Amino acid sequence: MKFGLEELAKRHLVGTSGENYVIYGPALDLLALKHYADLDHAISLGKFIAKGKESDVYEVLSATSELYALKFFRLGRTSFRDVRRKRASGQSETNTWIKSNYNAARHEFAALARLIDVTTNVPRAVDTDRHTVLLQELPGVRLSNRPELEDPVTVLRSIVETVRDAYVLAKMINGDLSEYNILTDGVRVWLIDWPQWVPPTHPNAKELLQHDVETVLKFFSRAYGVEADLGATMKDVGSAAEDS
Ligand SMILES: Nc1ncnc2c1ncn2[C@@H]1O[C@H](COP(=O)(O)OP(=O)(O)OP(=O)(O)O)[C@@H](O)[C@H]1O
Ligand SMILES: [Mg+2]
């Protein structure tokens, strides 16, 4: 046992903390990759798709020739503040780091599984393991790149409809929606990045929903000159109907 751990330590996959061994991030990456490889979800690793604030996303190829996007959560990469804030007392930093990332992956997988029943404008979640989620790889680019859109008004309408379906049918508010979390191929759109979603019963639900909608409307005005009224759009999304 000790010999095995020493070998892993030499490869910087585990380290020591006092008398204990602690596992390092790359070892978890390898274990997750082995999980997907064992299931034939991944037979080879493809290009590096993107580095998010809180994740790394890689393309993987499955045994059935499907391309997936594998998202590795990296909460706490830039700052341990959030992770610390959420730490239950008595837990070590490593435990906290692992738990936060495992929870984010589980939460995002559950969110996407629920959303796919009400809309096709989210990635299909294939599987989750440890701090990762395996997603259908979407075509297209982030809306923040301001790609040419065939019809910006229709694209905006699809986004608003997706926000409404998530809210009214799945009872979910993204809470972090922006041009950075929307992918498009110029015609279709996909809303990504759901680990922080909240239900309509959340104390700040209305503010978060309005913030999501307002962020998108402001972007469409700035980038595509499409103007839409916030009040009317919120009504379309369904929140005004509830108030009346
Ligand atoms: N299913 C997917 N198919 C293709 N690309 C994807 C997919 N999911 C994520 N990406 C790419 O990876 C990037 C980061 O993903 P995501 O927004 O989910 O993570 P994040 O770490 O929360 O990012 P950030 O905090 O920077 O918004 C996306 O902007 C997109 O470019
Ligand atoms: Mg994102």
Image: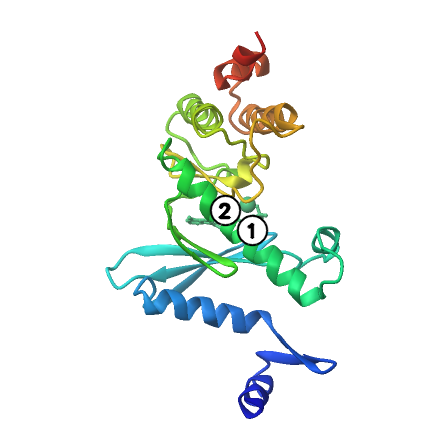
Asked whether, in this view, residue 1 is left or right of residue 48, the answer is right
> Which residue does the image show at 33% across and 69% down from the upper left?
38
Q: Is residue 126 above or below residue 174?
A: below
Q: Is residue 59 left or right of residue 40?
A: right
- Mark 2 belongs to which amino acid? Glu
Which residue position is annotated with label 1? 104
The foreground one among 223 and 131 is 131
Beta carbon at label 2 within 8 Å of ligand 1:
yes
User: What residue is pinned by disc 2?
Assistant: 108
Instruction: Pick the residue in front: 106 or 73.
Output: 106
Q: Which mark is residue 208?
A: none
Local SS, label 1: helix
**Distance (Cα) linking label 2 and label 1:** 6 Å
The residue furthest top is 244
Residue 200 at x, y percent in the picture = 57, 27
Location of residue 109 in the rendering, given as x and y in whole percent from the top left corner: 45, 48
Q: Is residue 31 above or below residue 6?
A: above
Q: Amino acid at mark 1?
A: Ala
